[in-house]
Amino acid sequence: MRGKQVPTSTTDQRLLDSRGAADWLHTDPWRVLRIQAEFVEGFGALAELGPAVSVFGSARTPPGSPTYELGVEVGRLLVEAGYAVITGGGPGAMEAANRGAREAGGTSVGLGIELPFEAGLNPYVDLGVNFRYFFARKTMFIKYAEGFVVLPGGFGTLDELFEAVTLVQTQKVTSFPLVLLGTQYWGGLLSWLRESALGHGTISERDLDLIQLTDDPVEAVRLVAAGARHG
């Protein structure tokens, strides 16, 4: 939907907003069926995908920029290593990874989300699923990927990264490699985690080891392949 057809609020927003009248009492039980349908659609679309890696990064990355070109290379290298590429299906770094995968002849997957400022999946997605609910979409990123490659990004990218770290830390998923690309961009975050979070004892040294950092896309793909879960 575009123009005046774009709703002024999202489905997630309406689900999570409990203020006002008690209309939710009558609508929320029916929302469960819509949520169930999203899981069924995602499971059905991706069940036979095969080995895959999720690539995250900013939707604001401009085409032709160094980060965009890095995303294209990552997508290509993942396909050459035998993986399908899963992204959020949007523009920027997500488009770049999908483009690299498609141009390399691999499977390019986009898991879109209903947002008021984004319309549709990027043109390099071959297999796409659109979601209304973030939590259903997040399940697909984890369930059907063997690891994450994370390009420079904002809040959405950080959200996916730290959710994945938490799932590995709490042993909800095992052998799930997380590789950050861009030492200049991510180095300050990892320094903060080491100096502040680790320094205050809120995480352990072992937790820090869950995240790997590199500037080399070849090394990133190698690290993912070496740590990927199988079976």
Image (spheres, rainbow, N blue to C red):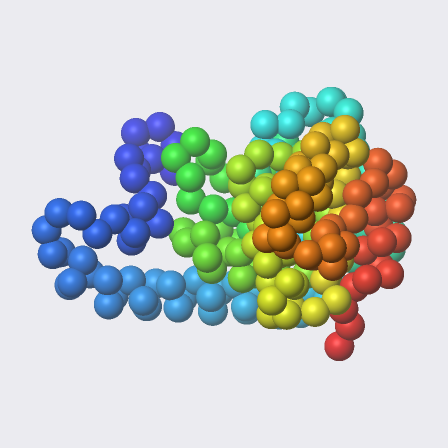
Q: Residue furthest left?
A: 21
Q: Position of residue 142 (x, y in %)?
A: 61, 61
Residue drawn 75% across the image and 66% down it: 175
- In this view, the residue farthest toward the front is 200
Residue 22 visible (yes or no): yes
Residue 173 location in percent, x, y?
Answer: 65, 68
Residue 231, position as x, y percentages in the image? 75, 77
**Residue 102 in view here:** no
Relative image position of residue 148 (x, y in whole percent): 70, 52
99 or 201: which is nearer to us? 201
Horizontal side, residue 10 vs residue 171: left or right:
left
Residue at left offset 77%, top offset 39%: 181
Is residue 105 depicted above or below 167 in this figure? above
* Number of residue marks: 0
What residue is rendered at 32% in x and 68% in y? 33
- Quarter of the figure with the N terminus: top left
Name the one closer to the observer, 174 or 58. Answer: 174
Residue 207 falls in image quadrant: bottom right
